[in-house]
Image (cartoon, rainbow, N blue to C red):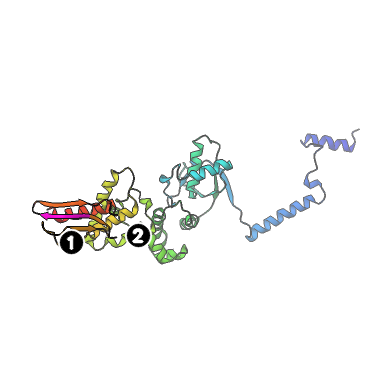
Amino acid sequence: MMSKKNANFAADLVAGIDPGAQAPAARRPGIGASVLAGRESRLAELATGSVVSRTHELVDPARCRMWVGHNREYALLNEERCADLIESIKAQGKQEMPAIVRRVKDDPAFDFEVICGARRHWTISWLRAHNYPDFRFLVDIRSLTDEEAFRLADLENRARDDLTDLERARDYLRALDAYYEGRQKVMAERINVTESWLSRYLDLARLPAELMAAFAIPQDLRIKHVTAIKPLLKPEDRRQRVFAEAGRLAQVQSDRAAPMPVPDIIRALALAADPPKRSGSPKKSGKPETIVSEGGKPLLKVEAVDRKGLKLTLLPHAGGTRAEAEAALKALLDQHWS
């Protein structure tokens, strides 16, 4: 007849329990009670709101699309802009910070749309295509309205240097009409900024396409540049001169190996808006006239003007920029070319 001890030993073997292993918490005096107490404490914290439970999942990035209101231009992401994140995820062996997403119900091709985390999505997708096929996209699934999603994305990205002023500005302009009925004051209150701060971003987003053509890389424009550009667009005659110069600069940019610096472009636009004024055409026997930049740097010397034309001397080493010299030449052409 099997003893009680041997019967328990056989029952453990049938159940798949190692008889030599330490007894589970429920069998050890005091341990089971402490585990249950810990679970009850955790549930109480969740119920009172002192602890927030989040649903995190590892998903296929191909099943995620960008939210239409995302404030980052996904098409501009590349290996260079995401280099720090690529190296970080490779070193950690995983994505540490989850992206914020919400579920998609209207598109069988996708399960989620990304509210915050475009760079993380791009990076995981890139790594999966470059020898890391096992990496998955870590997401934090939320239930959000569009306006809540906008404010959350703005809050997460506002202090990030890798989001350009132009991307943020265009996102604000879209949100102003989409969520706040064009009421700038209401929007400023909702995102907790001053109206003047918000106005500068909106001014950047509203710069006309005819002017933006002058910039080979529009994302290089910053908020600080708006105060110099905006006054050039009034009145209408100055506006048209600026647009014409922007078109010329666009052509110049297409022929250059490297884009012109933004300050040089702005100076050229300013010179086009207000061409250098001349007191009169120097006569053949008169004194030569030097045309200078706004900063007082010599650009051109008009040696003589007669019925045959103008005699000019370029001053490339006098401290002015090429853009300023080009604008001064153009002003002379406009003045003398019938």
**Residue picked out by circle 2:** 226
- Measure the C-alpha gap from mark 2 to mark 1: 29 Å
Quarter of the rendering containing residue 328:
bottom left
Residue 278: assigned label: 1
Say if 74 sits above or below 206 in the image.
above
Q: Is residue 338 left or right of residue 224?
A: left
Query: Looking at the picture, how far across and down is residue 99, in whole percent?
Result: 52, 49
> Is-magenta flag for residue 306?
yes
**Which residue range is magenta in the image?**
300-307
| Residue 81 image offset from top left, x and y in percent | 45, 45
Q: Is residue 272 magenta?
A: no
Q: Total of numbered circles in the picture?
A: 2
Q: Is residue 308 above or below residue 89?
A: below
Check disc 1: other Cα within 10 Å, few if <14, some if 14-19, many if 20+: few
Work out whether residue 69 or residue 200 is closer to the camera in this orientation and state it: 200
Horizontally, residue 284 falls left or right of residue 12, namely left
Disc number lying in front (2 or 1):
1
The answer to whether any part of residue 104 appears in the image is no
**Vertical order, 121 against 10 (above or below):** below
